[in-house]
């Protein structure tokens, strides 16, 4: 009789283990949490961008948003403010503390030059982080500035990332932060 009791207990434990493993297999893994570490990576890595889900998470959480603003302030060399409210339509030139940004059309259709002139810093910023009035974020690595403090970006309006960047720097309501 002892062997029968042992077999029943073993079968019962096997059934419970199977049920537990089945339940675990059916549960979804929790989405990776977006937090301060991801913000730090975003602000310090020129190639790191935020997905739409990460942007939504960032702006949905007031504490996370406050952390983002604090960390961005620490990484910012200079801010590019929105253009005066009187400005209508697209802007072709913007001033910021430490220089100017100018948009020039190219002779090649659909191509545009963005020229950034830095007045002073010995080590110019590595990235430009743009933010639309709606909260969309777009970051772009900056090319090295030449000896006169000038950096040039060539944009192709047929490339989505270039068109989005051009749209935000031309939008008078968008703001920017030049980051180290």
Image (cartoon, rainbow, N blue to C red):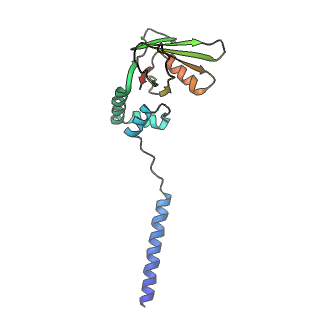
Give the percent coordinates (x, y) of residue 38.
42, 38
From what the image shows, is residue 87 above or below residue 76?
Answer: above
From what the image shows, is residue 7 above or below residue 94?
Answer: below
Left or right placement of residue 89 versus residue 76 in this view: right
What residue is drawn where x is 43% and y is 84%? 6
Left or right placement of residue 178 versus residue 106 in this view: left
Q: Nearer the viewer, residue 69 or 7?
A: 69
Q: Quadrant of the N terminus?
A: bottom left
Q: Nearer the viewer, residue 152 or 54?
A: 152
What residue is drawn where x is 58% and y is 23%? 163
What residue is drawn where x is 57% and y is 24%? 162
Residue located farthest toward the bottom when viewing the structure as drawn: 1
Give the percent coordinates (x, y) of residue 30.
44, 50
Give the percent coordinates (x, y) of residue 50.
48, 34
From what the image shows, is residue 146 above or below residue 68?
Answer: above
Left or right placement of residue 108 versus residue 78 in this view: right
Q: Quadrant of the C terminus?
A: top left
Q: Nearer the viewer, residue 93 or 127?
A: 127
Residue located farthest toward the top when viewing the structure as drawn: 86
Give the percent coordinates (x, y) of residue 176.
43, 21
Left or right placement of residue 157 versus residue 6 in this view: right
């Amino acid at each position: 009789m002892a062997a029968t009791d042992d077999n029943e207990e073993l079968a019962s434990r096997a059934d419970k283990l199977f049920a537990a493993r089945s339940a675990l297999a059916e549960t979804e893994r929790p989405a990776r949490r977006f937090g301060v570490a991801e913000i730090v990576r975003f602000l310090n890595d020129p190639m790191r961008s935020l997905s739409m889900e990460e942007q939504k998470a960032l702006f949905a959480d007031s504490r996370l948003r406050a952390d983002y603003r604090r960390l961005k302030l620490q990484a910012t060399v200079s801010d590019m403010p929105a253009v005066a409210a009187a400005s209508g339509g697209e802007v072709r030139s913007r001033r910021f503390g430490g220089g100017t940004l100018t948009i020039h059309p190219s002779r090649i259709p659909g191509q545009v030059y963005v020229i950034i002139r830095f007045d002073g810093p010995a080590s110019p910023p590595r990235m430009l982080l743009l933010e639309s009035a709606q909260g969309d974020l777009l970051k772009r690595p900056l090319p090295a500035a030449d000896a006169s403090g000038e950096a040039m970006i060539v944009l192709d309006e047929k490339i989505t990332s270039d068109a989005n960047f051009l749209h935000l720097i031309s939008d008078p309501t968008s703001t920017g932060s030049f980051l180290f």
